[in-house]
Amino acid sequence: QVQLVDSGGGSVQAGESLRLSCAVSGYTSSRYCMGWFRQAPGKEREFVSSISAIGMAEYADSVKGRFTISQDNAKATLYLQMNNLKPEDTAMYYCAADPSGVYGCPYRPYNYWGQGTQVTVSS
């Protein structure tokens, strides 16, 4: 059974950094998309970033140049380095996995989700 465990959230000031982690277990597919999504209070969940098994990374326009997604296959962990955080980045962040493909990761029907980790950025 696939399990994703998010961690690394916290409360920071604008301009500071955080690194989110997502520990993955029970995942054996060599074809996958992994992604980060976020949901702010009163808003719909939105795509933040994704990376595929072939290393193709994609980002929402709102985080390009500030966030970096990466993966450590040896540790079965997905990361999201978030720099120069802004108050509008405040949200619950979720990692997600889709084992059915390696292309079009922002649009995949993600099957597995972490429990979420809260990021709060104050001005």
Image: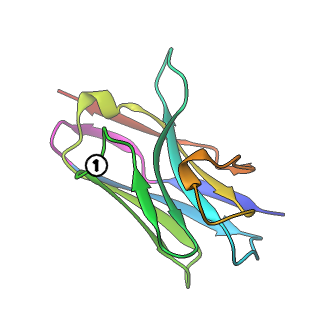
**Residue 65: x %, y % from top left:** 22, 52
Residue closer to the observer: 112 or 22: 112
Q: Residue at the top extreme?
A: 42
At horizontal 59% and vertical 75% (from top left) the residue drawn is 76
Residue closer to the observer: 110 or 80: 110
Q: Residue at the bottom extreme?
A: 74
- Quadrant assignment for the C terminus: top left
**Residue 11: x %, y % from top left:** 32, 38
**Residue 37: x %, y % from top left:** 52, 42
Looking at the rendering, the stretch of residues picked out in magenta corresponds to 8-16
Residue closer to the observer: 120 or 108: 108
Neighbor class of circle 1 (other Cα within 10 Å; few <14, some 14-19, many 20+) is: few
Query: 54 above or below 100?
Result: below
Direction from residue 102 to residue 109 in the image, left or right:
right
At horizontal 59% and vertical 62% (from top left) the residue drawn is 103
Direction from residue 12 to residue 92 in the image, left or right:
right
- Quadrant assignment for the N terminus: bottom right
Direction from residue 21 to residue 97 in the image, left or right:
right
Q: Is residue 39 magenta?
A: no
Residue at image mark 1: 64
Please name the amino acid that badge 1 sits on: Lys
At horizontal 60% and vertical 45% (from top left) the residue drawn is 107
